[in-house]
Amino acid sequence: MYGSRKIVLILIFFTVTILLALFYSDFIWSKPAQIVRTLSYSNSSRTPNFPRPNIGPFRNDNPTACSCQKTDPANKYVSKDELEEMQKRRAEEFRQHQIRTGRENDVLILAPANTPLQYPIKGFRVTPMNKTRIPGLALQTEARPVYKVSLRVQKGRLSVLDVQFGEQVDGQNEKELSISSSSLKQLNELLSRLTYTSTVYHIKTQDLAYFSFENHEVIFPIEIRRLSVPVLFDPGKDVNSQVTVLIKAFLRYKELNVLIQSIRSHYPKIKIIVADDSLEPEKVKGENIEHYIMPPAQGWFAGRNLALSQVTTKYFLWVDDDFVFLENTNIESFVKIMEANPELDVVGGQVESNQFSFRLEYEEGSSDEGGCITRVMQTRAPLPGFDGCFFVDGVVNYFMGRTEAVRKVGFDPFLKRVAHTEFFIDALGDLLVVTCKDLKIGHQKHSSTNKYSSYRHPSKSDSNAKMTHHFFKNHLKCIKY
């Protein structure tokens, strides 16, 4: 008898429990707004029963050392008696680079999931030392006798415009400011007039604003930027006013003249710029040709810089002095792709059947050792709307470039003889590059002179000096082609 009663009581208990669960579930799903409001705006004087999240700022430094498999470290090529001093100089230059590029302010900030504060999480930008209203500041909370918010910054001062008698604002024109009011509407009106003025002149930096109410605090970034003046090129009406052909010449005048003749057969009026560091320069004749004579054997990249510095058109087309225009060589096809995709900086073609293109896999590595970079002969992703075009990090030595963008990267004149991938290493993260099939040019068949070959293929000491250069300049631990 006792056992039967116990079973009945257990069944009643479980039945009541299930009914209560169903009722509570129905209540939650039928009234989500009230539940959210209760959770979000409970009495702030009570401490939440969960830990406050750490919302940052967190440094974005990467302390993990990177690795380049099956390759020698870049410092191997540095003389042992110079390595220690070079590493010190490199560390200081890298520190300054981090400051110039804003990496000192590169922090991660997480927006908290439960806060009554409204604020601009990204995109608030000011010009140096100019007073600017902070957009979007507001408080949304339940009724209280008094509302009080505070803000603080590090590189500027805060103020509220047109403060009237009776409006409680403490810390005008200081780094820390607080606003209080018995009216939430008045408090938000004051927040709408809150301004920020940077006190340190810098053209590219960032401040952090700390905005708090009771036990809530948020952080939002303030970008301090000097406005840049646009640099525009008038494209004119045809390809002749849009593109300049650039050539670096060295010793091979026979091939150079064949190339120029082939260009003129297709584009009689297009400007050609020749940078020439031959040992005994010869005259290059022709209409609308600019021939610049350099000191002897200054190198390929020095010549590229010289030629590029004289371009006045929106785009330039780079060709080697032993290339030749074919019947299907078409500059307008490059322009069409570039004009349809204004974000592109470089479009590469193919030299006969060679469409040399690659990806650069780069790890920043630790601040002490430097990064690791590996060249991989693969593409990244297709360019939408253009069959046969793919995003890459580097292309063959036949490409169209956006003049102003490529000028900002430049060609390192230290690299005299064998240099191509190195330009794209310097451009990584700054230039958007694609490679496209069927944008073809020919390559002349010739036998190089012994004198040319001796310059074309540098000695081992030159190669070691080149690797030492990369070790310092690109802050690399190792590099693998």
Image (spheres, grey):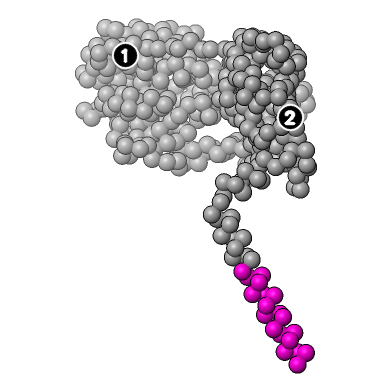
> What residue lies at 45% left-to-right and 29% top-to-bottom?
432
Q: Is residue 144 above or below residue 248?
A: below
Image coords of residue 225 (percent x, y)? 58, 16
Image coords of residue 64 (percent x, y)? 70, 41
Q: Please name whichever residue, 186 or 287, is drawn nearer the observer in this view of the structure.
A: 186
- First in residue order: circle 1 vs circle 2: 2
Q: Is residue 443 above or below residue 99?
A: below
Please give left or right for residue 217 compared with residue 439 in the image.
Answer: right
Q: Quadrant of residue 154?
A: top right
Q: Quadrant of residue 471?
A: top right
> What residue lies at 36% left-to-right and 28% top-to-bottom?
341
Tag 1 residue: 235
Tag 2 residue: 145
Name the magenta segment's main secondary structure.
helix
> What residue lies at 75% left-to-right and 89% top-to-bottom?
3
Please identify, in this view, whether the residue under mark 1 or under mark 2 is nearer the observer.
2
Q: Where is the N terminus found, in terms of image quarters? A: bottom right
Magenta segment range?
1-19
**Is there CB contact under 8 Å for labels 1 and 2?**
no
Is residue 34 visible in this depiction of the protein?
yes
Q: Please name whichever residue, 462 or 331, is drawn nearer the observer in this view of the structure.
A: 331
